[in-house]
Amino acid sequence: MGDIIIVGAGVGGLTLGLALHQAGIPCRIFESVPEIKAVGVGINLLPHATKELAALGLEAELSKVAIQTTDATFFNRFGQLIYQEPLGRAAGYDHPQFSIHRADLQMALLEAFRTRAGADRLTTNCHCLGVTQDETGVAVSFSDGPGGANRFTMRGRAAIACDGIHSAIRKQFFPEEGEPRYSGVNMWRGVTRWKPILSGASMIRAGWLSHGKMVIYPIRAADSDGLQLINWVAEIETPNYRKRDWNRAGSLDDFIGPFADWHFDWLDVPALIRAADSVLEFPMVDQDPLPRWSFGRVTLLGDAAHPMVPRGSNGAGQSILDARALTVALAAHADPAAALASYEQQRLEATTRIVLTNRSNPPDAILREVFQRTNDRPFAAIDDVISRDELVALSEGYKRIAGYSKEALSKDASSKETLRAS
Ligand SMILES: Cc1cc2nc3c(=O)[nH]c(=O)nc-3n(C[C@H](O)[C@H](O)[C@H](O)COP(=O)(O)OP(=O)(O)OC[C@H]3O[C@@H](n4cnc5c(N)ncnc54)[C@H](O)[C@@H]3O)c2cc1C
């Protein structure tokens, strides 16, 4: 019957490989880079995604390397507390919110896939160039790395593009689309070894994009010196940006200005930034939602399908939810084209809403609201600016759209049974 060919061994591709393996559906993963290395910085996984990872038997493993995030805490740029709410298990969810180094997550998925499915089921140095198909299957063409001279073709039952925001297969189906769309916000990201901040498991958002916004959260437990690895992101509205490259080094002088006087009693922000191990620079980009992902036996998944601006902690999580939905569809339909169409039907509209809401009303809309109502000035009491009910409504509205309200998750059936192929 042939393998499902997965293009790309990022979070989406590896999770799909694990889910297909669990369902007894044979697959192979082909990844462009010669060696999967620890790249990137922090990622958050919300309870809808950690629920799926738990169903894959990975919760205990991930708990060893991730922080179980306990609260979301919002401040203005004067360091005044606007709003705080519990997250993950602390909020009563059955599953945690994890804040984790992307590399720790990818390595845990990689290790699990190699152990369970077999190391020979994942091949690196295979850069996808495109795909063709007929009634019997797909033929995916590769070179040995980007621009590599050696070309070869792999045949399979279906092909799933998990090759990220610059997906070769997405480009094949949508050649006119052009480069990712710049949001007007540039980001500088880094990690710093630092003593625990606030609860030691807080997801902190502060300031606003026009004058400089910071997102700060720990991604590894304290070391023997009592220092955690703290992930931080400085986000500033600017017309100036350079094409996204996950490894582009950033320069402190380009962004530290707006944060120079952020000396708060709960954190000295410029000191945290200056103490970083390294700084990376990425533009905040996404793409307009597509009208379709599935073309017969070929479909898109994760960032290849729905790249979104990282303002709702949902990029990695939605790729995990895609992987689960696609596995369920492939287990339910003997005809792969029918399975891929059913997966698209389940996931395209849901992720379109998130892509668009991340542009307009992500969780940090709380910061925008207070920024506008105070005219960017310190307040005497937050209740004079915005009521607790309004703050809760802003936060809960996003959870409903992104599919992780407590209500939605408790209604959802247990994942594991549905993954078994019939
Ligand atoms: C190197 C890197 C660093 C990142 N760092 C962060 C971060 O710090 N924080 C954050 O929130 N998000 C980060 N992301 C994005 C984040 O991982 C995704 O938004 C999210 O996890 C969805 O994952 P995905 O599997 O759809 O895409 P990705 O995680 O982007 O994975 C795509 C995979 O496909 C491979 N690939 C690309 N083109 C081809 C091709 N033509 N043929 C074969 N394989 C191909 C890539 O090498 C990669 O392994 C990073 C992505 C990458 C690739």
Image: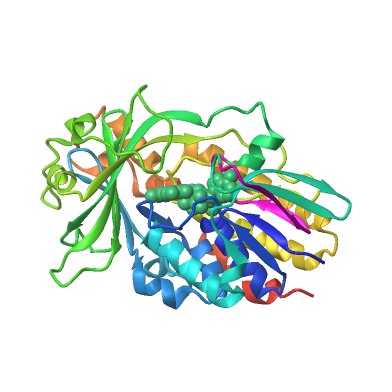
Magenta range is 148-166
Q: Residue at x 68, y 77 (%)?
A: 417
Q: Residue at x 35, y 70 (%)?
A: 65
Q: Where is residue 162 shown, x and y percent of the image?
A: 60, 51
Front one among 9 and 239: 9
Which residue reaches farthest front? 149
Furthest-right residue in this view: 135
Instruction: Answer with left or right where residue 384 lies relative to residue 240.
Output: left
**Camera-side residue of 263 and 385:** 263
Picture residue at 15% right of the left edge, 68% below the top: 226
What is the x, y in percent for residue 118? 59, 74
Residue 282 sits inside the magenta stretch:
no
Horizontally, residue 276 falls left or right of residue 287, namely left
Q: Is residue 138 above or below residue 381?
A: below
Picture residue at 63% right of the left edge, 68% below the top: 19
**How far across and down, in percent of the image, does residue 192 sit?**
21, 53
Quadrant for the N terminus in the image: bottom right
- Please tell me whether residue 162 belongs to the stretch shown in magenta: yes
Could you say where residue 355 lies in the image, as x and y percent from the top left? 55, 41
Hey, which quadrant is residue 167 in on the image? Answer: top right
